[in-house]
């Protein structure tokens, strides 16, 4: 089961990042009141990072019990642990170092400090996911259907101008991977070439997938993805949440939206 995309257009990148942040805070509060613990999967990229910063700067963020949030990543650049280009390093600066997290619940991909190559780091992450899933089941939560993965309440994604999501690039090995939850990528066209990523299978196990996109250079990718292109050529087209798929985009990224998806400006909230 997966949810049809729902599109919301914001005027520019700043209000977009603020809106993603506000939605994330609300969703985490709601999940925590229902289940106690919430899980978010973070993304790198400009809007993903700006949204985390907006969370940190929002007075409402204190409504979340951050020590009871699990943080995973959709992808990572395979670099030394402290490299400023790592998605996790950027997320720490934007948010994680500014709130009270439980370090045991912050699950970063391995780095070149600890692993010989991207495949080894990917395999390690798959093991960490599986053991979190097992712990979750032992605690009585069996809401996640896939036994290899913990429950992902919200999974954030950026989208590249070539329509990549996480580190799944058009036509390359990662987007074609089946039967695995993670994949090592050796030939990413966006530097650095070596990366580690969740597979589309793992991404699509999330309850909610939110794609946050800004800029006219992404308009073609957004248009193709929402027109229903194939996911091998247009990976973003394949990203779907079980309960909800949200495209949170700015006006520049919305220039090539298929007509039937242009929101009419009405209140679209559906909780
Ligand atoms: O490691 C990364 O680079 C990402 O996780 C990648 O998937 C990113 O989210 C998109 O490329 C969008 O990035 P921008 O928002 O910066 O264009």
Image (cartoon, rainbow, N blue to C red):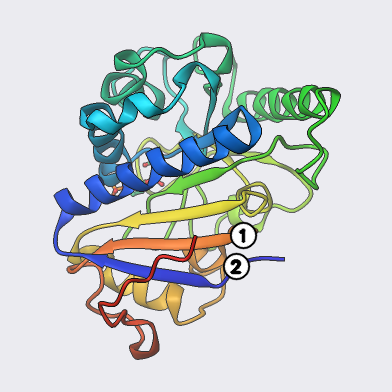
Verify CB contact (< 8 Å) between mark 2 and mark 1: yes
For the question of whether residue 159 can be seen, the reply is: no
Q: Is mark 1 within 8 Å of ligand 1?
A: no
In the displayed orientation, state which residue is furthest to the bottom.
259
Give the mark, 2 or 1, whose residue is nearer the N terminus.
2
Say which element carries label 1. loop
Across and down, in percent, residue 133 comes to: 76, 30
What is the x, y in percent for residue 212?
Answer: 35, 54
Neighbourhood count class around disc 1 (C-alpha, 10 Å): few under 14, some 14–19, many 20 upward? some
**Is residue 89 in view from this perspective?**
yes
The furthest residue to the front: 33
Query: In the image, is 141 to the left or to the right of 48?
Result: right
Which residue is at 45% across, 21% downward? 66
Local secondary structure at mark 2? loop
Q: Residue shown at 34%/16% (left/top)?
A: 99
In the image, is residue 102 above or below residue 134? Answer: above
Q: Residue 139: image x %, image y %?
A: 80, 23
Within 10 Å of disc 2 (Cα), the crowding (few <14, some 14-19, many 20+) is some
Q: Is residue 87 left or right of residue 169?
A: left
Between 88 and 11, the residue placed more toward the observer is: 11
Q: Which residue is mark 1?
A: 243
Q: Residue at x 68, y 39 (%)?
A: 151
**In whole angstroms, how far apart are the C-alphas of marks 2 and 1?**
5 Å
Specify the label residue 3 is tagged with: 2
In this rendering, the answer to whether 136 lies above or below 103 is below
Q: Please name whichever residue, 42 or 165, is drawn nearer the observer in this view of the structure.
A: 42
Q: Mark on residue 265? A: none
The image position of residue 144, as x and y in percent, is 76, 43
Q: How many marks?
A: 2
Q: Quadrant of residue 105?
A: top right
Where's the N terminus, which quadrant?
bottom right
């Amino acid at each position: 089961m997966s949810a049809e995309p729902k599109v919301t257009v914001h005027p520019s990148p700043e209000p977009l990042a603020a809106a993603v942040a506000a939605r994330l805070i609300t969703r985490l509060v709601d999940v925590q009141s229902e289940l106690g613990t919430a899980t978010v999967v973070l993304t790198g990229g400009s809007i993903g990072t700006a949204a985390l910063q907006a969370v940190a700067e929002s007075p409402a963020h204190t409504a979340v019990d951050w020590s009871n949030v699990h943080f995973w990543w959709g992808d990572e650049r395979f670099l030394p642990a402290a490299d400023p280009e790592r998605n996790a390093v950027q997320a720490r600066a934007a948010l994680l170092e500014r709130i009270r997290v439980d370090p045991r619940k912050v699950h970063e991909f391995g780095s070149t400090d600890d692993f010989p190559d991207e495949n080894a780091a990917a395999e390690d992450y798959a093991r960490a996911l599986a053991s979190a899933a097992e712990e979750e089941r032992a605690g009585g939560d069996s809401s996640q259907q896939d036994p290899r993965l913990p429950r992902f309440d919200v999974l954030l994604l950026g989208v590249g101008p070539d329509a990549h999501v996480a580190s799944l690039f058009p036509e390359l090995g990662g987007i074609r991977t089946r039967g695995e939850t993670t994949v090592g990528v050796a030939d990413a066209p966006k530097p650095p070439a070596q990366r580690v990523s969740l597979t589309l299978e793992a991404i699509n196990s999330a309850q909610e997938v939110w794609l946050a996109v800004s800029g006219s250079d992404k308009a073609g990718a957004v248009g193709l993805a929402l027109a229903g292109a194939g996911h091998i050529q247009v990976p973003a087209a394949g990203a779907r949440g079980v309960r909800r798929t949200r495209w949170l985009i700015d006006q520049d990224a919305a220039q090539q939206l298929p007509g039937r998806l242009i929101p009419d400006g009405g209140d679209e909230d559906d909780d």
